[in-house]
Image (cartoon, rainbow, N blue to C red):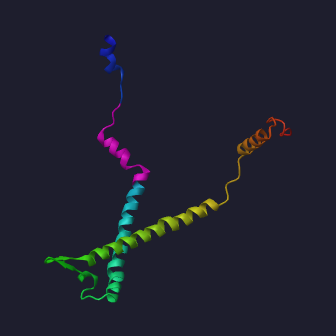
Amino acid sequence: MDLIKKAPMLVKVKVPTLVEEFRNFAFKGNMIELAVAVIIGGAFGKIVDSLVKHLIMPAVSVLMPGQQGYLGWKLNLAGKDIPYGLFIGEVVNFVLVALAIFFFIVKFLGWIMKAKKEAAPPPLTKDQQLLTEIRDLLLKGQPPGSGTQGR
């Protein structure tokens, strides 16, 4: 019974404070890289958004009939206007952002990663050479000391 009363005194566990936990979380390397990626991604999204709204959609509106281009494309249903032209503009914007990100991340970074993999591997260390020889001898069924007598 005395042991149960003394149990809280026997266990000393340091409980991190909320500030310590947040500091450990916020200053991890991955978190900072993620924050930079989000900021760059937001800026990249704005560039593509501007490309769609100011260059591509006005070019599309020249090809399609209408007074204000795609901004004026509306469907009138029971006295209410449904601006489907704005929706089409946002869909085109999304598709272009998705394509740009796909080509940058999947294709460009994949190409860079492939180039890194194709680089020659570093030469084996002496330990690695010996371990490789032992492995090869074991695969042949010879004892490890029989093939390397001169060393």
Query: Looking at the image, which is closer to me, 129 or 63?
Result: 63
Tell me residue 57's x, y (percent). Answer: 33, 81
Tell me residue 29's x, y (percent). Answer: 43, 51
Query: Looking at the image, which is closer to me, 86 or 106?
Result: 86
Who's the residue at 40% across and 61% down the image?
A: 37
Who's the residue at 46% across and 67% down the image?
A: 102
Q: Is residue 95 magenta-colored?
A: no
Q: Considering only vertical position in the picture, is 89 above or below 24? A: below
Tell me residue 25's x, y (percent). Answer: 37, 46
Who's the residue at 27% across and 78% down the image?
A: 85
User: Residue 89: which quarter of the image?
Assistant: bottom left
Q: Considering only vertical position in the picture, is 125 above or below 17? A: below
Tell me residue 49's x, y (percent). Answer: 34, 74
Q: Is residue 17 magenta-colored?
A: yes
Q: Considering only vertical position in the picture, is 78 above or below 128? A: below
Task: Label the magenta part by its dominant secondary structure.
Answer: helix
Residue 27 relative to residue 136: left or right: left
Q: Considering only vertical position in the picture, is 125 above or below 143? A: below
Query: Looking at the image, which is closer to me, 24 or 105?
Result: 105
Quarter occupied by the C terminus: top right
Most extreme residue toward the right is: 150
Most extreme residue toward the left is: 79
- Magenta region: 14-31
